[in-house]
Image (cartoon, grey):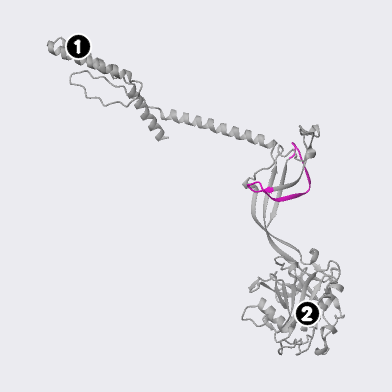
């Protein structure tokens, strides 16, 4: 503002200088000379007359070129004794007046811009086919944990367990694939697998190669490489090394990210292995115990509710302890440990020592004997799921859930009363001139919102959100619809 006023002030001074009539000074000088003529000689009078004529000629030439504005020339100081004419001072522009003028013009321009914008908005509402999202109506990077039943169909408690009929005898020496129904039935899907391993290769016969190169040794080594640290040789359960373990491996198609800790429960019915000869108590010869079945069942859960997780090579690790989902850990201050849970890879490890002591598994541990130990765990779990219930009447199957963290973006679609009251559907109009099919549509149209499309800046359709039911829209109704886009 200061620079503008300074320039305006300088321009005013230049204009004032250019408006001064320089001829008035020359007229005064001529009058003085005429007064002196009476005192001069005749020769002096001639010189004065010539000088006078010359000045008059130059004055006439200057009048012809007066239309061109030029900067004022520097005047010579008047001679001593001559009268001196006072030059009026330039009139200064009032800065406050100039500032008020600028403000009023700026206000008028702003009001005109706002009025034009409002008119454009009003015109766009009645023929609008899309609306740009306001940044406040978009909420990004929302994260939530979603859980569902682990087994096929979203079931959380697996009650039917069937060994695959498609496995060969050689495959069953390594593991048993468990289906939710007969493997040949329509809709049957694999749920999990059961394997048993021994660090030295005992409990199974070799495959005709080197000594102790048996399936049990291969299984133990495979899970040791997958789950333990490089220098660990044994699975340690509550500080006790277990040379043989059962491995429950959930089928990868059953969970997206991980098992949901705190919602895992395995029920095991003890076997009738007490007093039996170990070498002959193979998986094909065992049966579930019938002595007080409901009170003797072993219920196992993870200890995520009472302890913090540990981190290992395979991610988070929890202990498998005695308890139930409904009642929690039995004896939280001194729980009974049976195994380990690796939720991020979907593996549960159950120690063979605990099954021998509490469930009478009498695991076959002789060399070059096909003990079929993995089948023992299948019989104990399937019998519990099919026959046993808890005090509340719930079946004691294999309970588990999967969980995943889902990132999403929420879009809030605001439909005002004056917007989207007409349809591009051909049934909305009739005739070749596009007249409304119903006369009431002219002043009181009614349409139904069925879907919302999300477009990019190039107006390319990226996603479509379907409403659960059509939503009535008219000039007297507004709508707020939240669209959730998961990633």
Q: Which corner quadrant holds the C terminus?
A: bottom right
Bin the neighbour count of mark 1 within 10 Å (Cα to Cα): few under 14, some 14-19, many 20 and up: some
- Tag 2 secondary structure: helix
Extreme residue in the front direction: 432
Does the image show residue 237?
Answer: no
Instruction: Identify the disc placed on residue 419.
Output: none
Q: Which corner quadrant holds the N terminus?
A: top left
Q: Is residue 182 left or right of residue 141?
A: right
Q: Find disc 1 in the rendering and name its residue.
A: 34
327 or 483, nearer to the observer: 483
Instruction: Identify the disc placed on residue 171.
Output: 2
- Location of residue 408 in the rendering, given as x and y in whole percent from the top left corner: 67, 56
359 or 78, nearer to the observer: 78
Q: Is residue 160 left or right of residue 211?
A: right
Q: Is residue 388 above or below residue 444?
A: below
Does the image show residue 55?
Answer: yes
Q: Is residue 301 above or below residue 207?
A: above
Quarter of the image holding residue 143?
Answer: bottom right
Q: Are marks 2 and 1 in contact (CB under 8 Å)?
A: no
Q: Is residue 476 magenta?
A: yes
Q: Which residue is painted at 76% across and 32% down in the image?
A: 433
What's the CA distance linking mark 2 and mark 1?
A: 141 Å
- Location of residue 411 in the rendering, given as x and y in whole percent from the top left corner: 67, 49
Which residue range is magenta in the image? 454-477
Q: Which residue is painted at 67% across and 82% down in the image?
A: 234
Quarter of the image holding residue 189?
Answer: bottom right
> Reading the chain from its start, which is encountered first: label 2 or label 1?
1
- Tag 1 secondary structure: helix
- Location of residue 72 in the rendering, given as x and y in whole percent from the top left corner: 30, 26
- Location of residue 325 in the rendering, given as x and y in whole percent from the top left corner: 76, 69
Q: Is residue 110 above or below residue 178?
A: above
Magenta stretch, main secondary structure, is: strand
């Amino acid at each position: 503002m200061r620079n503008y006023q300074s320039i305006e002030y300088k321009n005013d001074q230049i204009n004032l200088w250019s408006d001064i009539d320089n001829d008035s000074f020359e007229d005064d000088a001529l009058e003085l000379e005429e007064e002196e003529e009476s005192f001069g000689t005749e020769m002096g009078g001639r010189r004065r007359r010539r000088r006078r004529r010359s000045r008059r000629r130059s004055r006439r030439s200057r009048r012809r070129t007066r239309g061109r504005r030029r900067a004022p020339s520097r005047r010579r100081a008047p001679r001593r004794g001559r009268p001196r004419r006072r030059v009026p001072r330039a009139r200064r522009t009032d800065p406050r007046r100039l500032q008020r003028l600028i403000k009023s013009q700026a206000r008028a321009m702003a009001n005109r811009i706002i009025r034009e914008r409002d008119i454009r908005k009003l015109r766009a509402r009645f023929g609008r086919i899309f609306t740009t999202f306001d940044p406040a109506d978009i909420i990004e990077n929302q994260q939530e944990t979603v859980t569902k039943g682990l087994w096929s169909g979203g079931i959380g408690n697996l009650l039917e367990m069937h060994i695959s009929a498609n496995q060969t005898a050689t495959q069953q020496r390594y593991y048993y694939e468990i289906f939710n129904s007969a493997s040949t039935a329509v809709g049957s899907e694999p749920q999990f697998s059961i394997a048993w391993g021994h660090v030295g290769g005992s409990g199974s016969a070799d495959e005709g190669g080197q000594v102790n190169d048996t399936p049990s040794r291969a299984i133990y080594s495979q899970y040791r490489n997958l789950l333990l640290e490089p220098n660990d040789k044994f699975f340690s359960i509550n500080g006790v090394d277990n040379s043989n373990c059962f491995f429950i491996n959930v089928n990868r198609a059953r969970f997206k990210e991980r098992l949901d800790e705190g919602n895992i429960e395995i029920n095991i019915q003890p076997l009738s292995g007490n007093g039996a000869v170990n070498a002959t108590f193979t998986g094909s010869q065992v049966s579930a115990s019938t002595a007080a079945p409901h009170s003797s069942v072993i219920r196992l859960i993870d200890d995520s509710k009472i302890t913090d997780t540990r981190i290992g090579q395979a991610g988070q690790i929890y202990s498998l302890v005695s308890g139930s989902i409904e009642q929690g850990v039995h004896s939280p201050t001194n729980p009974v440990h049976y195994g380990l849970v690796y939720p991020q890879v979907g593996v549960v490890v159950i120690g063979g020592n605990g099954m021998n002591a509490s469930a009478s598994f009498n695991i076959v541990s002789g060399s070059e004997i096909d003990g079929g130990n993995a089948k023992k765990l299948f019989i104990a779990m399937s019998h519990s799921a099919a026959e046993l219930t808890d005090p509340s009447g719930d079946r004691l199957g294999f309970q588990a859930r999967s969980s995943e963290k889902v990132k999403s973006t929420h879009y809030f679609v605001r439909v005002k009363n004056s917007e989207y009251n007409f349809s591009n559907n051909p049934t909305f109009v009739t005739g070749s001139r596009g007249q409304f099919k119903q006369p009431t549509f002219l002043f009181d149209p009614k349409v139904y919102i069925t879907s919302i499309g999300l477009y990019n800046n190039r107006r390319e359709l990226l996603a479509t959100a379907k409403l659960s039911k059509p939503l009535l829209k008219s000039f007297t109704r507004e709508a707020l619809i939240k669209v959730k886009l998961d990633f």
